[in-house]
Image: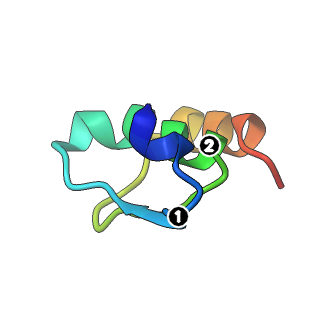
Amino acid sequence: DEMLARPDIDAVYVATPHNHHFPDGLRVLQAGKHVLIEKPFALNRRGRAGAKKETPK
């Protein structure tokens, strides 16, 4: 949370196991940061739809 609040950080690289990509990536997006995830962000359509709904445009 401290890292996501820092104004000098613009982007975050998420390198966690697949089942953590969605919650970790969503936290980064909700903090208004750019996120890089090498594997799928969500494991299914429901997760992708939820991410689109939960993040700022």
**Dot 1: element:** loop
According to the picture, the residue beneath numbered tag 2 turns out to be 31
For this rendering, which residue is in front, 50 or 54? 54
Give the x, y percent position of residue 28: 51, 46
Above or below, 31 against 57 in this view is above
For the residues labelled 1 and 2, the Cα–Cα distance comes to: 13 Å
- Secondary structure under badge 2? loop
Does 1 sit above or below residue 37?
above
**Residue 8: % across, % down:** 52, 64
Q: Which residue occupies 28% across, 35% down?
A: 20
In the displayed structure, does residue 2 sit left or right of residue 56? left
* Residue in the image at 71% along x and 34% along y: 54
- Answer with left or right where residue 32 lies relative to residue 22: right
Please state which of residues 8 and 18 is positioned toward the viewer in this rendering.
8
Looking at the image, can residue 25 be seen? no
Q: Is residue 57 left or right of residue 30?
A: right
What is the quadrant of residue 49 in the picture?
top right
Number of the front mark, 1 or 2: 1
Using the rendered view, name the quadrant where residue 37 is placed: bottom left
| Point 52% across, 49% down: residue | 6
What residue does disc 1 label? 8
Quadrant where the image shows the C terminus: bottom right
